Image (tube, grey):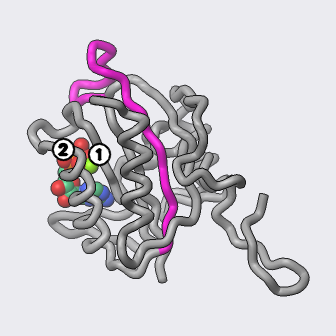
Amino acid sequence: MSRAVVALGANLGDRGSTLRAAAEAIAALPGVRPVASSREVESVAVTLDGPDTSKPRYRNAVVVVDTELEPQELLDALHGIEDDHGRTRQERWGDRTLDLDLVAYDDRSIDTATLTVPHPRAGERAFVLAPWLDADPDAVLPGAGPVADLLAAVGDDTERVDEPRLFGEPTCSSRPTTAPDGRTGAAS
Ligand code: ADP
Ligand code: MG
């Protein structure tokens, strides 16, 4: 079983509903188990030319899952969910109803023609780091360091959306804790 971090983004359509439906679809994938999720954040669209306030704003979130899928299998499944939400692939970093990126997969480094993990721009994107930290206060970006430090370095320009977490879980830690009687449970 491996632990994977997935970043969700949308700037077209009913963004909040799309992110929620996508998180549910991820959790329902065969070989995937939900672990933790963030609340949503909102931020200005970033294009290849930089921030663009004339574009619809983004909603972003992060989910943490345990999975038996290999990284490429997981990415293929995420692309299937993007397609189910009417994603078309035209312009790189263009407007989209749904973008699902594999941010990290255990502490593995992968670099193939179709998959780079950890995601090469995750460490400089507040819209990935802020919700990831929200989902997992102890998160570490493999090869780069604690997400809290990375977010402090880039500056958090995202706005928290006042909605429940995507998976609706009551606590905000992905780290299991062992109780004195040996049972495991979520830390608060
Ligand atoms: P972007 O997210 O950069 O705007 P796309 O979502 O259209 O662009 O993805 C472009 C390609 O990036 C995908 O076809 C995918 O194969 C590749 N890719 C490489 N590494 C990753 C990753 N870690 N997560 C998601 N896609 C990735
Ligand atoms: Mg993508």
Q: Which residue is farthest left?
A: 90
Amino acid at the residue labelled 1: Asp
Q: Is residue 142 visible?
A: yes
Residue 141: x and y in percent read 51, 59
Does residue 18 lie above or below 155 as drawn? below
Q: Is residue 63 magenta?
A: yes
Question: Which residue range is magenta in the image?
Answer: 46-66
Please name whichever residue, 34 or 154, is drawn nearer the observer in this view of the structure.
Answer: 34
Q: How many marks?
A: 2
Q: Secondary structure at mark 2?
A: loop
Q: Residues within 10 Å of mark 1 (few under 14, many from 20)?
A: many
Please name whichever residue, 37 or 17, is drawn nearer the observer in this view of the structure.
Answer: 17
Choose top left, top right, bottom left or bottom right for residue 11: top left
Does residue 6 lie above or below 149 as drawn? below
Cβ atoms under marks 2 and 1 closer than 8 Å:
yes
* Left-right relation of 6 to 75: right
Which mark is drawn over residue 99?
A: 1
Choose top left, top right, bottom left or bottom right for residue 91: top left
Residue 76: x and y in percent read 22, 66
Which residue is under mark 2? 87
Instruction: Identify the residue at horizontal 44%, vertical 64% (top origin).
Output: 27
Instruction: Identify the residue at horizontal 52%, vertical 45% (top origin).
Output: 129
Please name whichever residue, 39 or 84, is drawn nearer the observer in this view of the structure.
Answer: 84
